Amino acid sequence: MPVHPLSQGEIEGRREDFLDVLLDDPAGLANSSPPGLSREAYASRVLAGGFPLALRRAPGASRARWFRDYVTLVIERDVLDIRRVRQREILPRLLRSLAAQTGQILNVSRVARHLGIDPTIAEDYTRLLEAVFLVHRLPAWGRTLRSRVAAQPKLHVFDTGAGAHLSGLTADRLATRDPAALSEYGHFVESFVVNELLKQVGWSDRLVRFGHFRTHDGDEVDVVIEHEDGRVSAVEVKASSRVRDDDLKGLRILDGKLGNRFVGGAVVYLGAHAYRIDDRIHVLPLSRLWS
């Protein structure tokens, strides 16, 4: 079966407490946050992902070959262990198209049109790729809050290192400051955060449900975490070194709609410092996820 990537805390040999503090005392996150890392250091982690064998390879051609071989092995061995696939040559192309959608609303019909295949086949094969832990869906959350809340899931690559390889996103491309590459990188940063949070809940005793919140007006929160008692925490991700007031809109909508059910929220960004917006919303460096 496929290997699972490590969390950033596991890579550094420490137990992360971000999720526990977010659920219990979000104000404590800002109080205990060290200074953030450089943009280059963050990019290095996002593009590397968490597969131990990939991390042992130097960035560049050697690591790219490992990702290529790993993806090929999973598709040709593990997918076919689940069931025979008549159009197996479509799977690598489908996976690349899905990787390009990471951190975005999943649109299987658009992928099917791009590949020239039937949407039902695209959906079926997407579920196979989920079963072997190459991609996963984050369901929509909050339909009971208002009628104009989107119902579609978001798609995330299981590991941002493998996903960036599939999309051709490299440190050299980011260094050019090309707007398309930076936009693509922003989606991978979001997937990186989602994956780190899911890894942290994996060894927690808590029973929580993950989702994303998005209205048809475009207001959104990247990760909503609902406790078993109905309380809600949330995380918004920004791949920039500044947080604007508009970036807080989705969290404020949740705060206003949920009242005392809203425990608190965090905006995770690529800046250096943690600070408090108000009693329930805080801004934190990305590195606070594991440090």
Image: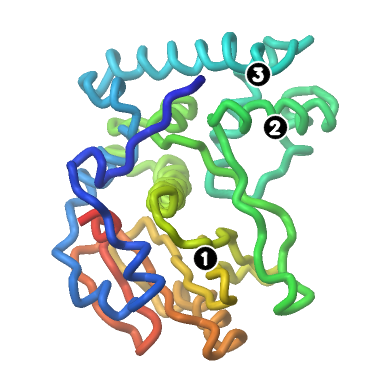
In the figure, is residue 15 to the left or right of 258? left
Disc 2: CA contacts within 10 A as few (<14), some (14-19) or many (>=20): some
**C-alpha separation, residue under disc 1 versus residue under disc 2:** 24 Å
The residue depicted at 44 percent of the width and 16 percent of the height is 70
Contact between marks 3 and 1 (CB within 8 A): the answer is: no
In the figure, is residue 15 to the left or right of 148? left
Type of the residue with mark 2: Arg
Q: Which residue, given by chain and number where applicable, does mark 3 sit on?
A: 91
Choose mark 3 or mark 2, whichever is in front. 2
Choose mark 3 or mark 1, whichever is in front. 1
The location of residue 129, given as percent across then percent down, is 62, 27
**Farthest-out residue, left:** 35
The residue depicted at 33 percent of the width and 34 percent of the height is 50
First in sequence: mark 1 vs mark 2 = 2
In the figure, is residue 118 to the left or right of 281? right
Which element carries disc 3, helix, strand or loop?
A: helix
Q: Which residue, given by chain and number where applicable, does mark 2 sit on?
A: 127
The residue depicted at 48 percent of the width and 22 percent of the height is 2
Q: Which residue, given by chain and number where applicable, does mark 1 sit on?
A: 225
